[in-house]
Amino acid sequence: MVVGQRERKRRCIRGEPLMNDTTWVLDGGRLIDPANGIDRIARLVLHEGKVHSIDTPDGDVPPDAGRLDVTGKIVAPGLVDLATELREPGSEEDETIQTGSNAALAGGYTTVLCCSSTKPLMDSAASVQLVRQIAQRVDGVRVLPIACLSKGRQAEQMAELGILAAAGAAGFSDTPRPMPNDALLKRALDYCRMFDLPIFDRPEVPELADGGVMHDGQIGLILGLKGLPTEAEDLAVARDVRLAEATKGRLHVGPVSTMGSIDMIGRVKSRGIHISASVCPHNLFGSDELLRSYDSRYKVHPPMRSPSHVEALRNAVAEGVIDAIESGHMPRAQEKKANDLDLAPFGASALETTLAAIATDLVETKILPWSRAIECLSTAPARIAGVKGGTLSVGANADVTVIDPLNAWSVEAKEFRSRCHSSPMTGRTLTARVTHTLVGGRLKFELHPTVASAAS
């Protein structure tokens, strides 16, 4: 059944399905599916929540199917984010699962891995199940909880990982905190092999990073702000790669931001050691020069580094040393971010700008082709997390993102669907924009809701 334009707009704002059709035909788009090596103009048919077929003749399409004309657009697997803070329950002034889901859909995400930045922490079966229940009620983006690695996120005693896995945890991490306890991390990597679930570590040595505000470099010295030294990350990455090699566990390191991290990860990968790494968009476009403004929207984590680190990170993504790009979505309420730079919390809203920022900074500059960008934002994150998604294979979940690669727009954070309106991208003109997001074959986001035609 096709619904009217006013109702479609209301549903778009609320993140509800825009159509009741069980079948969709996406016609005329450039289909990019890195998992299957597809990059060509093709028709995509979705039916009953799954990818039904590619290049189906008109005669085989149900007459009442919904049709989207995506000529000139890119049709890709739904984006997957490896580390999203949704803040609910406990810090709803920053974000809720509803507002975070709406932001994710607008950014082209169909699945997000939700960090344990909740109150109570996700270190019990009940807290994991609570987040899953709220997400099911919201019925927007797929939300997969990442449970705590340690009890109380105190890095002293390993959480009950088996119980958490049974409750639906998709992996384990103390993010946004690092894991300073080497013995606990090694034991957890060994233990998690039984569940075939990943551990995510945010690499940082707390003793070296404590009190830091920005990159430890010449700009920070001039501004009189305490620095976050590259060594704080490099030493943690060195520990992580050695433990990954010793245990053969599934360890993901990220986000990374330094040349030293890249060098170590590249060397262990060349020896066949299984480890994956990710980077945030803000570390691929901006340097610590932006902090000269003392504007807290540039206080992000990892911090914006010097231009040489930015260039090295871009090359590492292009060369495959860095596997994935995560949003770095760490929403914080405006009254918190409005503080002085040294007092304001780290964080930014990023779900709605990540794809566009990558298109602008890496695709338009010819550093990445679109196929590699989509691999980093969808296929690789799904593989790292071990979740369904990241592909348009026949029979796969009908999670689809449609992108207009020529739709330039100016970022106005106050218009975000997220509750957090602080973004280092504010004021930038970005190329490319998500126009449609479908989750399980249901149209959950449409940039400019219109009445869809029935397939003829």
Image: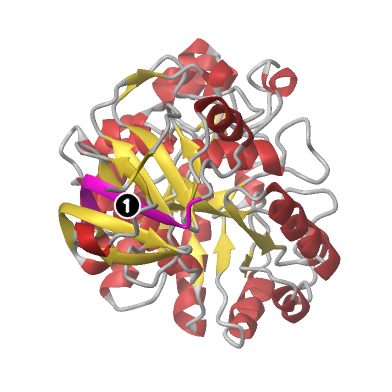
Q: Quadrant of residue 190?
A: bottom right
- Amino acid type indicated by mark 1: Val
Q: In the displayed orientation, state which residue is furthest to the top.
A: 293
* 446 sits left or right of 374 in the view: right
Closest to the observer, 63 or 124:
63
Q: Quadrant of residue 183?
A: bottom right
The answer to whether residue 330 is magenta is no
Q: Which residue is mark 1?
A: 25
In the rendered image, residue 287, in percent from the top left (x then y), is placed at: 38, 27
Q: State the SS at label 1.
A: strand
Q: Main secondary structure of the magenta part?
A: strand
* 434 sits left or right of 363 in the view: right
Q: Is residue 330 above or below residue 234?
A: above
Q: Is residue 397 visible?
A: yes
Q: Which residues are magenta?
A: 21-32
Q: Is residue 260 above or below residue 160?
A: above
**Residue at x 63% of width, y 72% of height:** 185
Within-10-Å neighbours for mark 1: few <14, some 14–19, many 20+? many
Closest to the observer, 90 or 133:
133
Q: Is residue 180 visible?
A: no
In the rendered image, residue 347, in percent from the top left (x then y), is placed at: 61, 33
In the rendered image, residue 308, in percent from the top left (x then y), is placed at: 29, 36
